[in-house]
Image (tube, coloured by chain):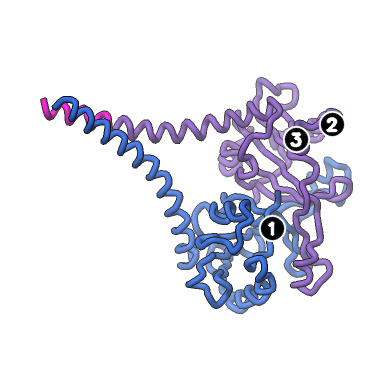
Chain colours: A purple, B blue
Amino acid sequence: MFRRRRLLSLVLLAGLAATGIVACTTTATSRVDDASRLIDEGQLPPGYRDWKLISVAREENEIDDIRAVLGNDTALHAYRQEKRPFPEGTIISRIAWSYEASEENNKVFGRSRQSFVAGHPKNGVQFMVKDSAKYASTGGWGYFQFDDGKPTKDAKAMQNCFPCHAKFEAHDYIFTNYAR
Amino acid sequence: MFRRRRLLSLVLLAGLAATGIVACTTTATSRVDDASRLIDEGQLPPGYRDWKLISVAREENEIDDIRAVLGNDTALHAYRQEKRPFPEGTIISRIAWSYEASEENNKVFGRSRQSFVAGHPKNGVQFMVKDSAKYASTGGWGYFQFDDGKPTKDAKAMQNCFPCHAKFEAHDYIFTNYAR
């Protein structure tokens, strides 16, 4: 009887340990799903600013910003495996800032045109969300922009996303390469 | 006796659950410590490329790169809390790439000088590690650079780190601000 009880305890303990692991995994997965849903519902997904870095870029002319492209774990995994098309649930985010000459850095370097840094947030926060069924008419990707944390009111600008991205159909509509 | 056994099981279960949580926390903490140690021993800390983004920048002239500044969790927490000096264990990393006009992007935009992206890795991977006792002679920060994954052989260049960073003593020797 004692041994059976002890066995039962061990089974319970092992079960709980396994549950602990599953709890961790489930949390991570449901966060991914939550992010897609929240974006679609017009909310910035919490934590997107901490997503992993895919690459950086600078756009000149009217856009005039310096930017970072971040991705959720699904995006990063696909980039590293060079897996195309990107899997369902991939989310790629573009954050951008004004492109500013850093006077304090330049003073240290003793040059007037040396160091350019990220200034104030600019050109909104954009997301591409992969859901082949839901966004079938735009290559399987949904396009979203948030201005000051709210869905953009510039509906016309959003209609300009897909026509450009469509030219990158061979790369599953994505401009950005992973910066190794 | 039965109730005591059941109580014991519950205590054990609760203990294991707590251990599960502690195990997660310990793993995160020891990774931070590991990173400092590994850098000091001349090894790139696994996963540094996935650290959270602090900001992006562009350096012109001889440096001629586009860069991202990443930080471990201690760094990010301090940046967000605007906590200076940075706590012990803070690690800030600078990764950089060649600054390249993207021909394929520019073709889409119909302009020759529009989109600049990260090309090949350039100027090494740099780290600043906060350990006030160990690096007391350089403001409490250790300066490290890895070229092609190995500690740089350019000892002279490394001697140039602190004299410039020393000019930012008021910002705890750090050039980069957090890009909000």
Q: CA distance from mark 2 to mark 1?
A: 30 Å
Q: Amino acid at mark 1?
A: Asn
Where in the figure is residue B145, as x and y percent of width and height?
58, 67
Residue topped by disc 3: A146
Categorize mark 1 by other alpha carbons within 10 Å: few (<14), some (14-19), many (20+). Answer: some
* Above or below, comparing residue A178 to residue A11 in the picture: below
Q: Quadrant of residue B144?
A: bottom right
Task: Single out the mark in the foreground, 2 or 1.
Answer: 1
Q: Quadrant of residue A43?
A: top right
Circle 2 chain: A
Residue B70 is covered by the magenta coloring:
no
Residue topped by disc 2: A154
Circle 1 chain: B
Nearest the viewer among B130 and B8 is B8
Where in the figure is residue A122, as x and y percent of width and height?
79, 45
Element carrying mark 2: loop
Q: Is residue A170 visible?
A: no
Q: CA distance from mark 2 to mark 3?
A: 10 Å
CB within 8 Å, label 2 to label 3: no
Element carrying mark 3: strand
Please identify the quadrant where the N terminus of chain B is shown. top left
- Name the N-terminal-most of marks 2 and 3: 3
Q: What are the residue bounds of the magenta stretch?
A: A1-13
Residue at the limit of the structure toward the left, as seen here: A1
Residue A10 is covered by the magenta coloring:
yes
Q: Is residue B109 visible?
A: yes
Residue topped by disc 1: B177
Q: How many marks?
A: 3
- Residue under the image location 74 percent in, 72 percent down: A108
* Disc on res. B66: none
Element carrying mark 1: loop
Where in the figure is residue A33, as x and y percent of width and height?
58, 28
